[in-house]
Amino acid sequence: MAAGRADAQRNRAHLLDVAAAAFAEDGTTSLNEIAKRAGVGAGTLYRHFPTREALILAVYQHDISRLVDSVEAVLAAYPGDPLAALRAWYIQLANYVRLKHGLGEALHTAAARAVIDESHAPVAAATATLLDACAAVGAVRPGLDPADVMQLMGFLWRVSDDPRGRAQADRLLDLAIDALRPR
């Protein structure tokens, strides 16, 4: 029985990975297309995710969880430069949020609001970890409120995802990071 649960968990994780990639390409990808790409029958997909909304919300939770869990790896990728890690991590967060916003009405239900609200605390904790690393090397003021920084960084998911928008995001990131520096 434990092997069956492990297989089910692997299937679910595989379906989430395939769905995340499919939704990143096209937010209107059908559930049948996702099942086909995952190499499973539609019944398997529907057993795990009985509705499109359930799948979209699970993908969102899965992506946010992976992002939150990536903080230490992102810090390790920028040794001695936690401010660059903060910047890179927020760009990745913006990509997730931008994808979420591209999924339309599926994310405007009460169930969606609950899932999105649940992601706030882990994202705030990840932000706090990054801010603490930055403060430890004097790159930002100590004692910054992670919720304030999250609000400040919200511009990232409002710029367009094209070369002009990415250039604007880089300029705005410079301004935002300057606001976090010690006075």
Image (cartoon, grey):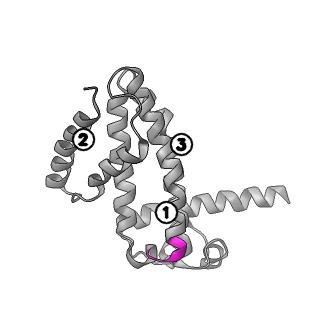
Residue 120 x/y as whole percent: 49, 54
Could you tell which of marks 1 and 3 lies nearer the N-terminus? Answer: 3
Q: Is residue 97 magenta?
A: no
Estimate how packed mark 1 is, as few (under 14), some (14 to 19) or many (20 or more) residues with alpha carbons within 10 Å: some
The residue sitting at 37% across, 33% down in the picture is 85
Q: Quadrant of residue 143?
A: top left
CB contact under 8 Å: marks 2 and 3: no
Q: Find the magenta span and give its range.
A: 108-112
Q: Nearer the viewer, residue 148 or 90?
A: 148
Q: Amino acid at mark 1?
A: Ile
Relative to 76, 168 lies left or right: left
Identify residue for label 3.
69
* Label placed on residue 116: 1
Identify residue for label 2.
176
Determine whether 75 is above or below 102 in the image.
above
Q: Amino acid at mark 2?
A: Ala
